[in-house]
Image: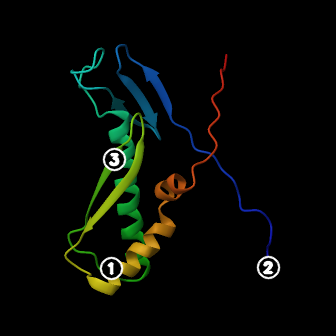
Amino acid sequence: MDLSEPEVSERSVHARWDGGLRVHVDAGGFEIVSDEPDSVPGGSGTGPQPTELLLASIASCFTIALAYTAAKRNIELKDLFVDVTGRYDGPRFDAFRIAVRVREPRDAQLTRLIEAAKRVCYVTRTLSEPPKIDVVVEE
């Protein structure tokens, strides 16, 4: 039995300011534009807000986790949709609601898949026990 520490790895994304409140992010070789709406001074409304990207991260990760756990159990998912809503409390979210809609499976089988997905989803697990955040200046 191997009792050594689990392997630790890192992932990075790279952001470049594009003027105003618009940012280009390289995420795994994919470009994502983030911006603020026109109604915010400096915003141009050309991309989702950072908070919307956070909600998208939760929704996409939890959807993938459900699909993954269903596939491992040879359970066919039909018409899976995941909606995530964040509740603002001042300058932060204080709660998230993940709503799962699926035609099949239902009831106890779906409940078991959701419980398994909670264990598999890296994003929701990270948010449930927030990590330390270090901000450094690099040359």
State the separation of the CA atoms marked 1 and 2: 33 Å
**Circle 1 — which element?**
helix
- Mark 3 or 2: in front is 3
Residue in the image at 48% along x and 54% along y: 123
Mark 1 or mark 3: which comes first in sequence?
3
- Mark 1 or 2: in front is 1
Quadrant placement of the C terminus: top right
Is residue 7 depicted above or below 41 in this figure?
A: below
Quadrant placement of the N terminus: bottom right
- Could you tell me the amino acid type at mark 1? Leu
State the separation of the CA atoms marked 1 and 3: 25 Å
> Which residue is disc 1 drawn over?
110
The image quarter in which residue 24 lies: top left
The label on residue 1 is: 2
State the separation of the CA atoms marked 3 and 2: 44 Å
**Circle 2 — which element?**
loop
Picture coordinates of residue 5 (x, y %)? 77, 62
Q: 131 left or right of 30?
A: right
The label on residue 32 is: none
Q: 3 left or right of 88?
A: right
> Which residue is disc 3 drawn over?
87
- Could you tell me the amino acid type at mark 2? Met
- Mark 1 or 3: in front is 3
**Circle 3 — which element?**
strand
Instruction: Give the crowd class for mark 2: few <14, some 14-19, many >=20 residues within 10 Å.
Output: few
Picture coordinates of residue 69 (x, y %)? 42, 74
Residue in the image at 66% along x and 50% along y: 9
Instruction: Give the crowd class for mark 1: few <14, some 14-19, many >=20 residues within 10 Å.
Output: some
Residue in the image at 57% along x and 55% along y: 129
- Could you tell me the amino acid type at mark 3? Arg
